[in-house]
Amino acid sequence: MTNEFIQEKLTEKFGDAVSGFRESYGILRFEAPKEMNLKVLNFLFDNEEMKFRFLTDLCGAHYPERKGTELEVVYHLHNLTDNIRLRFCVSTDVNKPDVYSATGLFLIS
């Protein structure tokens, strides 16, 4: 599986809602609106080709110069089967920092 294949599948599924694709150190990074975070995460988790079922890290970043999107939630995902990593980002307003929780998807049972 390549980063180009992942980008193609995401674009095929979500169209223009996913954007900002770029690669750094071999890891594909992309963005989607915060309201779509669970739809995108569920697709990456459930799709048999994607298999991003391990949440390596969840972190936040603050960009005070980006008015209206000052906060960014960054999901670092890992497909353990194919040993591929992915960085998925959603941005939100510092005055309304609500983002749907992904806890239910990555519960350890």
Image (cartoon, helix red, strand yellow):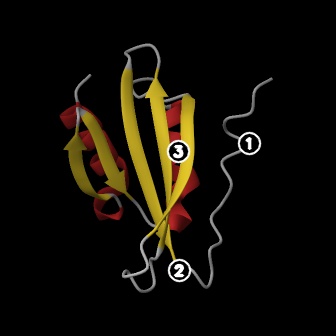
* Distance between the alpha carbons at the discs numbered 1 and 3: 11 Å
Secondary structure at badge 1 equals loop
Q: Amino acid at mark 3?
A: Leu
Gap between marks 3 and 2 measured at Cα: 21 Å
Name which residue type carries label 2.
Asp
Q: From the viewer's perspective, is residue 78 above or below residue 9?
A: above
Mark drawn on residue 93 = 2
The disc at residue 60 is none
> Which of the pair 51/99 is nearer the observer?
99
Q: Secondary structure at mark 3?
A: helix
Whichever of callouts 3 and 2 sits on the residue coming sooner in the sequence is 3
Q: Is residue 41 left or right of residue 12?
A: right
Mark toward the viewer: 2 or 1: 2
- Residue sitting at x 55%, y 51%: 59
Q: How far across and down, in percent of the image, does residue 28 sit?
A: 28, 40
Q: Nearer the viewer, mark 3 or mark 2?
A: 2
Q: Earlier in the sequence, mark 2 or mark 1?
A: 2
**Are the residues at dot 1 and dot 3 in contact (C-beta closer than 8 Å)?**
no
Mark sitting on residue 41:
3
Left or right placement of residue 87 versus residue 16 in this view: right
Q: Position of residue 86 (x, y in %)?
A: 38, 37
In terms of depth relative to the viewer, which is nearer, 57 or 101?
57
